């Protein structure tokens, strides 16, 4: 991947993160989990954290959603995040 292409994707990703905060309606829980998982994969890579225990179901769901993306490279996750934010914006803006 060329440096210019990578910089373009990074700029688009940052813009999509900002855009995700401008939705006028709250997305469904499964959409929020997908958004969270793509963001974490795009910014941190594979989930190396221990799975939460106990009754913190929200933390468990977030952990599992991110873990499902294991092996997806960060630039692919960034591009998917950008596309998904565009979908959400059309649906909820």
Image: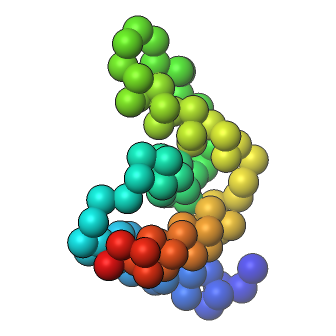
Regarding residue 16, the answer to whether it shows in the image is no
Q: Is residue 87 above or below residue 69?
A: below
Q: Position of residue 34 (x, y in %)?
A: 53, 52
Q: Is residue 3 above or below residue 60?
A: below
Dividing the picture into quadrants, the one containing residue 84 is: bottom right
Tell which of 36 and 10 is nearer to you.
36
Q: Position of residue 52 (x, y in %)?
A: 46, 19
Residue displayed at 62% across by 62% down: 77
Residue displayed at 51% across by 75% down: 87
Residue displayed at 40% across by 29% down: 59
Is the C terminus in the top left, top right, bottom left or bottom right quadrant?
Answer: bottom left
Tell which of 91 and 22 is nearer to you.
91
Q: Judge left or right: residue 48 versus residue 26.
A: right
Tell which of 66 and 61 is nearer to you.
61
Q: Judge left or right: residue 68 versus residue 26.
A: right
Q: Position of residue 35 (x, y in %)?
A: 48, 57
Dividing the picture into quadrants, the one containing residue 6 is: bottom right
Tell which of 87 and 50 is nearer to you.
87
Is the N terminus in the top left, top right, bottom left or bottom right quadrant?
Answer: bottom right
Regarding residue 85, the answer to whether it shows in the image is yes
């Amino acid at each position: 991947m060329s440096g210019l292409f990578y910089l373009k994707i990074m700029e688009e990703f940052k813009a999509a993160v900002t855009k995700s905060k401008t939705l006028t309606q709250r997305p469904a829980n499964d959409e929020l989990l997908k958004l969270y998982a793509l963001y974490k994969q795009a910014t941190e890579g594979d989930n190396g954290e221990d799975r939460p225990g106990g009754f913190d179901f929200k933390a468990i769901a977030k952990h599992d959603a991110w873990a499902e993306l294991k092996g997806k490279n960060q630039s692919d996750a960034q591009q998917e995040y950008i596309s998904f934010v565009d979908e959400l914006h059309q649906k909820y803006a």
